[in-house]
Amino acid sequence: MARTDDPVALNQWYAIETLSEVAASPRRTRLLGQDIVVGRDDDDAPTVHTVDTAGRIDAALPVRERYGCLWTTLGTPPREIFDIPEAQEADRRFVICGWVRMRTSAPRVIENFLDMAHFPYVHQDILGAEPHTEVAAYESEIRRDVDEVWATNCRFFQPRIAATESAGDFALLTYRVPSPFTVMLYRVCPSVPSRLDAIALFIQPIEEELCRAQPVMFLVDQNSAHNDLLKFEQVIFLQDRIIVENQRPLRLPLEPRAETPTRADSSSVAYRRWLKEKGLRYGTIAGWR
């Protein structure tokens, strides 16, 4: 598949590798249909280059080291990588959960992350459980001043709010979409209710219907073992993988008539509207069929 010509997709920053896994020996991958090579130069600095049609290493791409990952872009982003203030707080646990490859579009993965209605059925006895299936009304908006989508005042019953908890309770959640291919969840920390845990999902769109994603957590938790935190998030994400790979169409329809939304889909509706306003074509279906 050829590199996309969609300027909206090209002019984004993308996490493409875990920094600790960037080696001197070049590793080939793809971004937006473009072959790229990730490696290190003679000074041990991470590098990313495009690969031409003959398989030769070509142009150097911009790189950033942020949130435990190496980031790059194929275009000219209008701004730097979004800020995660929680990443600067020294007392937080930083847990990078590993990449998961999925046969679906990146926007479908974002939409699934925003969806609370599937919690009792897909993440039974972890993030949801019957008979607590109702999604209470919450607020969704496109914040024009920062060009992000937010869903606030989300409340949902969860049997295990976090790895530290074994008893169920209503979780207070906030969702943030800071870029078309990144989504975040903030939840009130059960052990320190005055603070929020932050969980980000970074997505590398390999092709329009193929991507890989990595959850990265910034947690207020000094007691749990690292492997317990890692396992908790990986179990949830691998359950989600089954769902998103079976959704049809694989690309996200942007027209409201294509899929009938409910009250629970308020954040998805705002996300789709935001993408449509931007004119994003990559991984989406613009028209109704």
Image (cartoon, grey):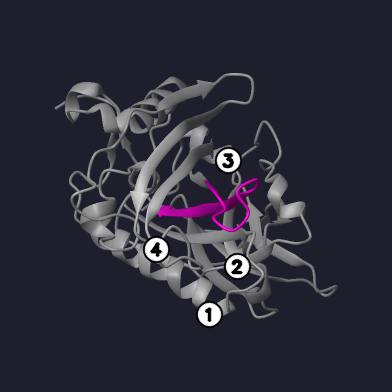
Q: SS for tag 4? A: loop
Q: SS for tag 1? A: helix
Q: Counting residues from the N terminus, which is met first, the one under dot 4 or under dot 1? A: 4
- Mark 4–mark 3 distance (CA, rounded to whole Å): 40 Å
Which numbered marker is on residue 12? Answer: 3
Label 1 Cα crowd, 10 Å radius (few <14 / some 14-19 / many 20+): few
User: What residue would you read off at disc 1?
Assistant: 227
Q: Say if 225 sits above or below 232 in the image.
A: below
Q: SS for tag 2? A: strand
Which amino acid type is marked by label 4? Answer: Ala
**Which residue is more in the foreground, 282 or 179?**
179
Q: Quadrant of the C terminus?
A: top left
Which amino acid type is marked by label 1? Answer: Asn
Answer with left or right where residue 241 lies relative to residue 89. left
Asked whether residue 51 appears in the rendered view, the answer is: no
Which percent across, then down, holds residue 20?
Answer: 67, 74
Which numbered marker is on residue 167? Answer: 4
Which numbered marker is on residue 95? Answer: 2
- Mark 1–mark 2 distance (CA, rounded to whole Å): 9 Å
Which amino acid type is marked by label 3? Answer: Gln
Label 3 Cα crowd, 10 Å radius (few <14 / some 14-19 / many 20+): many
Residue 273 part of the magenta segment = no
The magenta stretch is 187-206
Q: Counting residues from the N terminus, which is met first, the one under dot 1 or under dot 2? A: 2
- Mark 3–mark 1 distance (CA, rounded to whole Å): 32 Å
Give the residue drawn at x 58%, y 67%: 96
**Which residue is more in the foreground, 128 or 199?**
128
